[in-house]
Amino acid sequence: MPIQTLDDLAVQGTTLGVRIDINSPLTDSGELADDARLQAHVDTLSELLERGGRVAVLAHQGRPGGDEFCGLRPHANRLDEMLSAPVSYCDATFCEAARDAVRSLDDGEAVVLENTRFYSEEYMEFPPERAARTHLVERLSTVLDAYVNDAFAAAHRSQPSLVGLPTRLPGYAGRVMEAELDVLGGVEDTDAPRAYVLGGAKVSDSIGVAESVLERGIADHVLTTGVVGNVFLFADGADIGDATADFIHEQGYWEYIDDAADLLEQYGDSIHLPADVAVERDGERYELAREEFPPTDDEAAMDVGSETVAAYSAVLEDAETVVLNGPAGVFEEATFADGTRELYATAAESAYSIVGGGDTAAAIRKFDLDGFDHVSTGGGAALRMLTGESLPAVEALEQ
C-alpha cells in the first residue's frame, strides 16, 4: 500500500500529532549547539501551519542517563524563531496538561510537547498493536485527528510515538520522510556506474550494505575506508599493525573479518581497499603504503593516504551515482581530515550524489561542502534502507 503524504491530508482546522527528530548536540549550559536537525523539518511544519493545521510536535532529546537527556524548551524556542507561526512549549507529553495545551491551539499554531523519552515506555520497542496500547498513545490520540511522521532518522525504531500513533490515527509522511523514502528507496533506479563509499566505524552495518548492494547488482564499486577499510585490509591478509588490531578487537569488530573475507572472495573485483594509510609519527601525519606495512606497534591507521584518495577519486569521477556512508578517517582531527574532505569534495562533483546521515553529514557540515543531491537526516535508518531492510515506522504508515 502506498504511503499517504501531506498531499493527501486535509489540513485546515485539523489537530495533528507531528513526530520529528530534533535530537541535537547541546552546549554545557543546555542550549542548542547545532540546529541542523530543526532546520530539516521547517518545510513540513511551515506547510502544515500555513495550511491551517493545529500542530502538536512530538520529539526526543538524548537518552536516559546521558548528559544530553533534557527537556525541549530550547528546541521550542528555536522553532518559534524559525517559523512564521507561533510555537509554544508544554512541559508535559500526554497528561491532562499536555492534552489541554493541544486542545487550546488555534488554526496555524503549534506546541512542542515535552521529550517523549521522559516517558519510560517510549524508550522501549513494541509491535505496533502493543505500542498503540501504551499510555502515551492511548491518551494523546484522544485529542488528535491525524498523525504525521517526519522523523526519518528514528524510523528504524519501533517506539510508541513512531508506530503506536499511526496504528490508532490516520498516518501520513511528512516532507522529510517522503524525500528520504523516494531517494534512498530508489537508488537502484539511478544511473550507473554506481559507487558506494563505505567507511566510519559501523563495521557490521557497512558490511551489510556492501553485501546487499553487491548481491542485488546495484553497486559497481564499493570503496572501503575508515575502520571498515581496516577490517577489509586485515581480511585481505594485510598487517596494518597491533594498534589498529587492538582497536578492532576492543570494538568487537574482529568477528567481521571473516565476513569481509567472504565478500572479497565473492565480489573482489568490485571492492576497493586502501592502498595506503596515515598514522601519527613523531607528532605528524605519516603515510604508509601497503608494501611498507606494518606500522610500528603504537601507530594506528587514522586515515587513508593520498595514494588511496587519488585512486578512489578516479572511480568517483567516472561514477554517475555516488553514495557516501561513513568518513575515511578521524576527520575531527585536522591531521587526519584529508581523506574524508578530499573524497567528499570529489563526490560532490558527481552527476548524482547521496549522503548518509550521522557522521557523514556531520563531516560535510564541518568542511562546509555542498553540491550533494541528497543529504540524509538519518544514520541508522539510512543504512537499513540501503541494505533493503524495512523500517518499523514506515511499515506503520503503510498499514
Image (cartoon, rainbow, N blue to C red):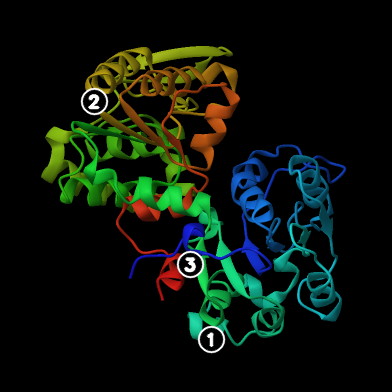
Left or right: 56 in relation to 369: right
Q: Is residue 91 above or below residue 315?
A: below
Q: Amino acid at mark 1?
A: Arg
| Rendered image: mark on residue 319 | 2
**Element on which disc 1 rests:** helix
Q: Which residue lies under the disc numbered 1?
A: 130
Residue toward you, 378 or 174: 174
Q: Amino acid at mark 3?
A: Ala
**Element on which disc 3 rests:** helix
Q: Which residue lies under the disc numbered 3?
A: 393
User: Is disc 1 surrounded by few (<14), some (14 to 19) or many (20+) residues within 10 Å?
Assistant: some
Q: CA distance from mark 3 to mark 1?
A: 14 Å
Instruction: Tell me which label, 3 or 2, sits earlier in the chain.
Output: 2
Residue at 29% x, 57% y: name it.
388
Residue at 27% x, 18% y: name it.
317
Residue 76 visible in image: yes
Instruction: Tell me which label, 1 or 2, sits earlier in the chain.
Output: 1
Left or right: 397 in relation to 116: left
Circles 1 and 2: CB distance less than 8 Å? no
Residue at 51% x, 80% y: name it.
167
Q: CA distance from mark 3 to mark 2?
A: 32 Å
